[in-house]
Image: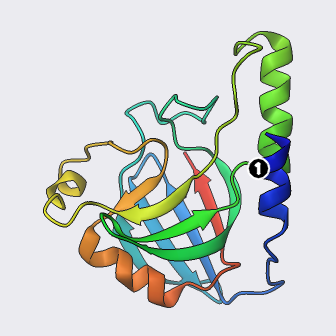
Amino acid sequence: MMILFLIFSLFPTPKHSAYKVVIDKSDYALNIYENNEWIATYPVVFGNDDLGDKLKEGDKRTPIGTYHIIAKRLHKEWGCMLMLDYPNKSNIETFNKRKSSGKIAPTASIGGGIGIHGTRKKEEYIIDYFMNWTDGCVSLRYSEIFELYELLPVGTEVVIQL
């Protein structure tokens, strides 16, 4: 767990980006703002139908919180991947509190590898039917992820909320 935090802290986060992404889980929407002005909305899906906060590795929940894009890469199945800095310091603190209170097992792991990516090329219908399918990532249509990949720089703030 600490190794993941150290790896993510190696990625420098630019102090300012003109863009901000706000993902509303209850609306299944990813909103993009440029200089605080709304510019686009994309429909998205998540890990599973429980839209609550991610508790531990393997629960297929999408985390809630404020993150940053730390890396961008092409992906052979999902088109592109915008990696987020999950788990961050806040996630680790919350995770440890939940462990101490007994809400999650003492042997649980926090997980990692959360990002924004596309569907598989021939499975864009998943978005139209709000079929949550990822392991905790945010997914939008294969044909739309390339727009985000080109538009959003590393360092862009991403807020995931209910």
**Quadrant housing the N terminus:** top right
Residue shown at the point (73%, 16%) measured from the top left: 107
Q: Residues within 10 Å of mark 1 (few under 14, many from 20)?
A: some
Instruction: Label 1, secondary structure: give it.
Output: helix
Percent position of residue 84, x then y: 63, 62
In this picture, is 116 found above or below 87?
below
Which quarter of the figure has residue 144?
bottom left
Percent position of residue 141, x then y: 27, 67
How many numbered discs sit on the rendered protein?
Answer: 1
Percent position of residue 150, x then y: 46, 89
Residue shown at the point (24%, 61%) measured from the top left: 120
Residue shown at the point (71%, 58%) measured from the top left: 66
Q: Nearer the viewer, residue 77 or 94?
A: 77
Residue under circle 1?
4
In this picture, is 61 found above or below 152?
above
Relative horizontal placement of residue 29, taking residue 94 as reference (left or right):
left
Q: Nearer the viewer, residue 74 or 142?
A: 74
Which quarter of the figure has residue 127?
bottom left
